[in-house]
Each structure stands twice: as structure tokens, then as C-alpha cells.
Amino acid sequence: MECTVSWTGAASTRSGMGFIAETGSGHVLAMDGAPDERNPANGGQNLAPRPMEALLAGTGGCTAYDVVLILKRGRHDVRGCSVKLTAERAEVEPKVFTKINMHFTVTGKGLPETAVERAIAMSHEKYCSASIMLGKTAEITTSFELHEA
């Protein structure tokens, strides 16, 4: 797996904190920093997610992918899955994630609550490399709600 991240300010005024990530699979992801009112040249323009937001979003994608795949492989009629991640970061550098809650909303037809609970646990404990990696610095908790389709 590979990814090239390039600073977009380098081509113009050497200001701003925008970056473009080009993934090995041929996709592009824009990232930007927060504006810095005291020194605008050192801040972003708020044109894209922050890098840590992208990390959190990637973790959500990783675990939601697992949950859907596990339910489908169990021949369950899953129709929708979303996960809201709420994170806290350390107050001093490096400002790692210290707490992350993943709240899943799963929709399906006749989905057993135990199957959803098991799929989330399997992702959290075995399959989601992103959340397992973040679990080295953050306390990760999960919750879910189940909706009938």
C-alpha cells in the first residue's frame, strides 16, 4: 500500500496548509488545516477535512465495512450501516486520540441484535486494523441502534 501526499501551497505562494493525497489505488483526497488568524500563512483555508479528521473518517469506513461484510457473510439482510465517531484528543503534543466512541446505526430486515453486536465486536477486536491501531492510544467504546427496514 502506498500514498503520496503533496503540499498544494508549494506551487503558488508557499502559504496555506492544503495537501493532496494520491493513493496507490488511484484516488485523490484533499486535506487542509484550520485557519490561523494570527498568522494566515501558517494556517489552512478550511477547504477540506483536517488530516486527523481524515484519519477518524478512515477508521469509521474500516469498521463499517467490516460490520456490513460480517453481516452479509452471515446471510443477514442488512440494508444500511452508518457509524458516528466522536473523539477526544490529548491537550499537548502529540495530540493523539485519547477516547473514541463509535455509535453504529444498522438497518435491516429481521436482523438479530446479537448478530449486529457480534459483528461490531469482531470488527473492533479482530478485523479493523485502523481501530485496533488507534486503540493503542485511545480508549475505544462502541454502541449501536438497530432499525427494521
Image: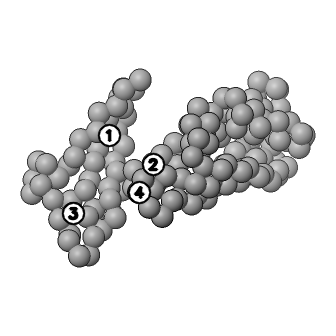
Q: Which mark is residue 42?
A: 3
Q: Is residue 70 left or right of residue 16?
A: right
Q: CA distance from mark 1 to mark 3?
A: 20 Å
Three-letter amino acid code at the position of disc 4:
Glu
- Disc 1 marks which residue? 21
SS for callout 2? helix
Q: CA distance from mark 4 to mark 1?
A: 24 Å
- Give the amino acid at mark 1: Ala
Q: Measured from the top left, where is residue 43 in percent x and y?
A: 26, 64
Examine the rendered structure and indicate whether residue 57 appears above or below residue 5. below
Q: CA distance from mark 3 to mark 2?
A: 20 Å
Q: Quadrant of the N terminus?
A: top left
Q: Are marks 3 and 2 in contact (CB under 8 Å)?
A: no
Q: What number is the disc on residue 78?
A: none
Q: Mark 1: which secondary structure?
A: strand
Q: Earlier in the sequence, mark 4 or mark 3?
A: 3
Q: Earlier in the sequence, mark 1 or mark 3?
A: 1
**C-beta proximity under 8 Å, tags 4 and 3:** no
Residue type, label 3:
Asn
Q: Position of residue 94 (x, y in %)?
A: 42, 53
132 above or below 81? above
Q: How many marks?
A: 4
| Cα distance in 3D space between marks 4 and 3 | 18 Å
Q: Residue at x 20, y 69 (%)?
A: 40
Residue 9 location in percent, x, y? 17, 52
Q: Are marks 1 and 2 in contact (CB under 8 Å)?
A: yes
Q: Which residue is mark 2?
A: 54
**What residue did someone put label 4 on?**
93
